[in-house]
């Protein structure tokens, strides 16, 4: 491995994705650069890197996902040199719901009829009309323009296009009716007057035609771009042929959130573009879970759930109703809230969860950032991106899901998520409202007016699972069973003579007698690696593989410059049954796909925990490979039906 390649991997492991991508570009490693830009949700740069690497189809996919016109046009120009391939790619784009891009590709490849159909499906009626006309179907072209003018009667470009179309096909009376409504001071008037003159002459209305001659003689030639241009074009980025971007809201390593206007309904929406690579990195089933979840969530209708407006599974992206009131996290940064207001917010979230739980959906990431407010201040539960249909196999270690400060203790220990773990999340954000910080960081309530009963309710919501209510609606009823003060408490300033501040993890980590570091939150021993460690590419591969038969990467702490890996404990394994062997093979293949090999498939690195055989984490020896791993796995003794568990 070259030094520069190693540097790219180290930057990637530290989540410095854009720096890693730029370095890969310098090295001419275009496939790596494409992948890294995609993970950084920089689809424009990813598309350009794919073009540089002669992968026009991938470039087009990335450009259309992000709505970037320039790399899209460049990719189309390459693809149409092989028309059959171009039409196949266009069909894939249509299947993904990217109809406008499919239409542009079809048009460039000479399939005007197919382009017209795709433009119509994208709602781009002006371009659909032109494509229908080019394919020899003026009737459908006129129908598209009529539909456009019904919703936008002042669209002069569409009016001129329709008038010219009618005139060319001998429908002069209709052409006159349409073109007479083009204002005399409009840029399109000169060209409209010439078409009007021809139609009036054809109808034998010589006097009316002569009245236009002076206007035509004195009119300057219309600028070519002013006539017949796409009336929806404004220079703004349009996603999926429908959502015009008005602002860049947020960007994370896994997603990019944009504020946009739905050009069909006129309403504001939030478009959340996920990094497909990041979803793949979260586990081989994560993308499939995400797709299934979005399909189910699309059917959820509840007044306290942010409505899902659209879903593009292969982008992947979701379109949600825009929430102009910001998040609870923002509000808690700015101000204290009254306990009674906190109850209203928590009960809204709980009623939303009640509906989701009824359909078998767990949220798994309840936190203040995922509670949003509309213009009137009503609370909504958002971001079911970490959610999945209830699955006993899904734990905190299955992907980097949830936020530890608001996560139930049993989830931190790696136990399956449940309804009650979602309830803990609501209790934790309610605790934050009451105390100014999540559980474990503050035990003192801001309001001195809280009754003993109110304090007991707050503590019960973050108690042990058997102390919490049985359901979300039961928790909502519990919150409504006692009064909470309506007075807004004052924030408590930190005492100047108080104890020195501690790092967030100082109280989590203890050193056992064996010398191992133990995380009290997750109740497991851990290995700690600096982010600049040479182990980071391997750690990153374990995180990407995200397999239950591999030691888990538990957390990345950019602020402290380290990453935590699970130190798996349990009974050593000497032999395997067929199911265990197959699970380990699957884990090793997942690790190889993530860019690493284990290298130590032997009884010293195999542990049975909770009925599952797990490969522990260790540094890889020289020459480690998937082939060697599978050969070592094949050499491990088989357990006969009568063999006792070691």
Image (tube, rainbow, N blue to C red):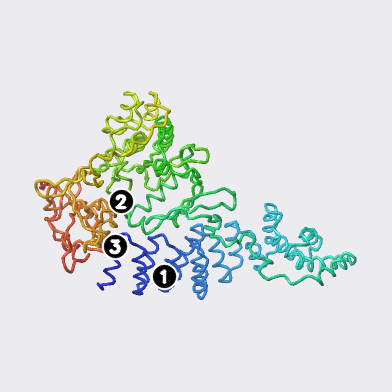
- State if disc 3 and disc 1 touch (CB < 8 Å): no
Q: Residue 73: image x %, image y %?
A: 52, 69
Residue assigned mark 2? 399
Q: Earlier in the sequence, mark 2 or mark 1?
A: 1
- State if disc 1 and disc 2 touch (CB < 8 Å): no
Mark 1 or 3: in front is 1
Foreground of the two, 142 or 225: 225
Q: CA distance from mark 2 to mark 1?
A: 28 Å
On the rendered structure, is 625 left or right of 76? left
Sort mark 3 into few (<14), some (14-19) or many (20+) by Cα contacts within 10 Å: some
Q: CA distance from mark 1 to mark 3?
A: 22 Å
Mark 2 or 1: in front is 1
Q: Residue 554: image x %, image y %?
A: 25, 50
Residue assigned mark 3? 593
Residue assigned mark 1? 49
Foreground of the two, 351 or 521: 521
């Amino acid at each position: 491995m070259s030094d520069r390649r190693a540097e790219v991997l180290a930057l990637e492991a530290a989540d410095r994705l854009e720096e890693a991508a730029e370095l890969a570009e310098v090295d001419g490693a275009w496939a790596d650069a494409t992948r890294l830009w995609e993970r950084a949700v920089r689809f424009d740069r990813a598309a350009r890197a794919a073009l540089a690497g002669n992968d026009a189809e991938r470039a087009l996919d990335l450009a259309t996902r992000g709505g970037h016109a320039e790399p899209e046009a460049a990719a189309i120009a390459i693809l149409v040199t092989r028309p059959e391939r171009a039409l196949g790619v266009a069909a894939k784009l249509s299947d993904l719901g990217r109809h406008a891009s499919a239409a542009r590709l079809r048009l460039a490849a000479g399939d005007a009829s197919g382009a017209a159909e795709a433009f119509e499906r994208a709602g781009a009626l002006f371009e659909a009309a032109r494509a229908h006309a080019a394919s020899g179907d003026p009737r459908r072209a006129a129908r598209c323009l009529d539909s456009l003018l019904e919703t936008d009667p002042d669209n002069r470009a569409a009016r001129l296009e329709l008038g010219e179309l009618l005139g060319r096909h001998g429908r002069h009376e209709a052409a006159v009716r349409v073109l007479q409504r083009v204002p005399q001071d409009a840029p399109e008037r000169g060209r409209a007057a010439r078409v009007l003159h021809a139609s009036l002459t054809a109808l034998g209305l010589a006097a009316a035609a002569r009245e236009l001659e002076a206007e035509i003689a004195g009119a300057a030639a219309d600028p070519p771009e002013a006539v017949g241009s796409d009336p929806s074009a404004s220079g703004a980025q349009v996603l999926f042929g429908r959502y015009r971007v008005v602002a860049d809201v947020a960007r994370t390593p896994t997603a990019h959130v944009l504020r946009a206007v739905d050009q069909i309904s006129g309403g504001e929406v939030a478009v959340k573009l996920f990094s497909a690579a990041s979803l793949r990195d979260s586990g081989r089933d994560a993308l499939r879970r995400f797709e299934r979840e979005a399909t189910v969530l699309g059917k959820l209708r509840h007044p306290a759930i942010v409505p899902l407006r659209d879903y593009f599974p292969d982008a992947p992206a979701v379109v949600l109703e825009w929430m102009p009131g910001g998040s609870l996290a923002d509000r808690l940064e700015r101000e204290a809230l009254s306990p009674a207001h906190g109850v209203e917010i928590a009960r809204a979230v709980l009623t939303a969860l009640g509906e989701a739980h009824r359909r078998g959906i767990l949220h798994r990431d309840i936190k203040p950032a995922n509670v949003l407010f509309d213009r009137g201040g009503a609370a909504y539960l958002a971001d079911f991106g970490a959610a999945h249909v209830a699955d006993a196999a899904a734990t905190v270690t299955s992907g980097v899901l949830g936020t530890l400060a608001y996560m139930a203790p049993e989830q931190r220990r790696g136990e399956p998520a449940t309804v009650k773990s979602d309830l803990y999340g609501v209790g934790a954000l309610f605790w934050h409202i009451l105390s100014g910080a999540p559980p474990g960081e503050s035990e003192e309530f801001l309001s001195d007016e809280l009754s003993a009963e109110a304090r007991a309710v707050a503590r019960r919501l973050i108690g042990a699972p058997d102390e919490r209510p049985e359901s979300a609606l039961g928790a909502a009823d519990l919150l409504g069973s006692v009064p909470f003060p309506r007075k807004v408490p004052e924030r408590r300033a930190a005492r100047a003579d108080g104890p020195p501040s501690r790092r967030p993890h100082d109280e989590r980590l203890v050193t056992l007698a064996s010398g191992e570091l133990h995380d009290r939150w997750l109740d497991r021993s851990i290995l700690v690696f600096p982010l600049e460690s040479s182990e980071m590419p391997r750690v990153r591969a374990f995180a990407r593989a995200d397999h239950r038969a591999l030691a888990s990467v538990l957390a990345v702490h950019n602020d402290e410059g380290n990453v935590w890996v699970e130190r798996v404990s349990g009974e050593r394994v000497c032999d395997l049954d067929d199911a265990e062997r197959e699970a380990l093979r699957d884990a090793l293949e997942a690790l190889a796909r993530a860019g690493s090999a284990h290298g130590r498939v032997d009884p010293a690195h195999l542990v049975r925990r909770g009925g599952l055989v797990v490969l522990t984490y260790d540094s890889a020896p020289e020459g480690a490979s998937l082939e060697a791993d599978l050969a070592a796995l094949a050499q491990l003794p088989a357990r006969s039906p009568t063999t006792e568990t070691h």
